[in-house]
Image (cartoon, rainbow, N blue to C red):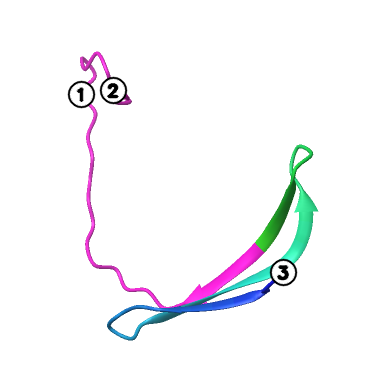
Amino acid sequence: MRTRHVDESFIGTRFTGRITAHTEVGGPPAVIHTVTGRAWITGTAQYFLDPHDPFPGGFLL
């Protein structure tokens, strides 16, 4: 199993993922990982909930 993976986008930006430990979660095997790279804030948003909205948390179809 590969424990380190470097991914590069088509514009040359990169991030690295690495498995740092093996464990179990509720029985099935799992991994604990780290991800490193750089990121920039490209926007912000603010959401408001109407107290009279019958579906304030949204809905799924």
Q: Amino acid at mark 3?
A: Thr
The mark that comes first in sequence, 1 or 2, is 1
Residue to which mark 3 is pinned: 20
| Side of 48 relative to 37 (left or right) | left
**Where is residue 52, by image quadrant?**
top left
Q: Secondary structure at mark 2?
A: loop
The answer to whether marks 1 and 2 mark residues whose Cβ atoms lie closer than 8 Å is yes
Residue to which mark 1 is pinned: 50
Magenta highlight range: 33-61
Binning the other alpha carbons within 10 Å of mark 2 as few (below 14), some (14 to 19) or many (20 upward) gives few
Q: Secondary structure at mark 1?
A: loop
**Which residue is at a point 63% across and 77% down the rendered structure image?**
4
**Which residue is at a point 71% across and 52% down the rendered structure image?**
30
The answer to whether marks 3 and 1 mark residues whose Cβ atoms lie closer than 8 Å is no
**Where is residue 43, by image quadrant?**
bottom left
Binning the other alpha carbons within 10 Å of mark 3 as few (below 14), some (14 to 19) or many (20 upward) gives few
The C terminus lies in which quarter of the figure?
Answer: top left
Q: Is residue 3 magenta?
A: no
**Where is residue 20, by image quadrant?**
bottom right
**Which residue is at a point 32% across and 73% down the rendered structure image?**
40
Q: Position of residue 38 (x, y in %)?
A: 41, 78
Return the residue found at the far bottom.
Answer: 12
Q: Secondary structure at mark 3?
A: strand
Label for residue 56?
2
